[in-house]
Amino acid sequence: MDLKKSPAPTDARPDSPADDRPLPPTELRCSDADRDRIADMLRDALSEGRLTADEHAERVEGVLRAKTVGELDAFVRDLPAAHGSRPSGSQAAPLPNRPSAAIPAEADENVVAVFSTAVRRGRWRAGRRIHAYAIFGSVEIDLSEALFEYQQIVVKAISVFGDVQVRVPENVSMRGTGGGVLGNFEVSPLDSGDPQAPMVFVDGWAVLGNVEATPRKGRLVADILERVSERVSRSMDRKSAGEWERKVNHKLEQVDRKMRRRMGL
């Protein structure tokens, strides 16, 4: 007689929850903060030239539709930012908080609003130093479409019971130093992947007012290509004008010779 007890049957209830184990992180539902983090990576990749505009738009649409963290990670799997590093050889030195080049203390342009509004935007040539003063008024300095003739630009913003807004393209670098006295001084730091990209320094104070500097989404510096295009266009215009002038002079000389022969001169 076998006195050994047979093992107790295991509980194999089909209705018992088989997935009591925690889900892997990639299968967790993503939050709005997760989507924003991935969208920021895609935006940086666009500004660095790693993605085309079409690729960026397509991936952003996928980010908005994603349900899990794993689905989000798929959109940045081939980007260095997703791995916490940049490709070898592209490590950039920390950007300074002050201009490395000597910039004159005198402003190239003053934008002043006293109980009024002053706006500088569109296609304009930004000088090395711009001063903005808002006293019971508002000033907007929009560099998103400006021509950057200098690599380093200083914007000095003073707000007294007023508001100063500075807008820059997404693919420039930006730093800010200043503060507020019962006011708000806020500069969103930017780091461009291009070491030759313009650098904007925003300095100033907000006294019972507001000074804010942020990038304009979708705006990129493209003035280098536009400058080349302008030069080529001007060159072509000069050549066309010179050719037309030569043809006119040649016709006039022919007419003059015919008239002289008829008149026996």
Image (spheres, helix red, strand yellow):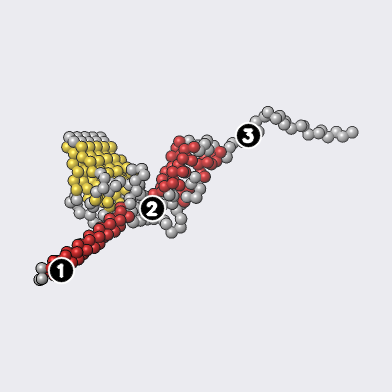
The answer to whether 83 is drawn above or below residue 67 in the figure is below
Q: Are marks 2 and 3 in contact (CB under 8 Å)?
A: no
The x, y position of residue 60, in whole percent, is 45, 42
- The amino acid type found where label 3 is placed reads Asp
Where, quadrant-wise, is the C terminus in this rendering? Answer: bottom left
- Mark number displayed over residue 19: 3
Q: CA distance from mark 2 to mark 1?
A: 66 Å
Judging from the image, what secondary structure is the residue with disc 3 in?
A: loop
Q: Residue furthest right?
A: 1
Foreground mark, 2 or 3, reads 2
Mark 2 crowdedness (10 Å alpha carbons): few <14, some 14-19, many ≥20: some
- If you read the primary sequence from the N terminus, does the residue marked by circle 2 or circle 3 appear first? 3
Q: Which mark is residue 257?
A: 1
Label 1 crowd bin: few (<14), some (14–19), many (20+), radius 10 Å:
few
Q: Which secondary structure lies at badge 2?
A: loop
Q: Are marks 1 and 3 in contact (CB under 8 Å)?
A: no
Q: Nearer the viewer, mark 1 or mark 3?
A: 1
- Taking the spot 43% from the left edge, 49% from the top edge, the residue there is 52
Classify mark 1: helix, strand or loop: helix
**In the rendered image of this protein, does residue 194 appear above or below residue 176?**
below
According to the image, label 2 marks what residue? 193
Coordinates of residue 79 in the picture (x, y in percent): 47, 50
Horizontally, residue 173 falls left or right of residue 57, namely left
Q: What amino acid is found at the position of numbered circle 1 in the picture?
A: Arg
Q: Residue at x 83, y 34 (%)?
A: 4
Q: In the image, residue 156 lies at what x, y percent?
A: 23, 46
Q: Is residue 257 visible?
A: yes
Question: Depth check: 38 or 243 in front?
Answer: 243
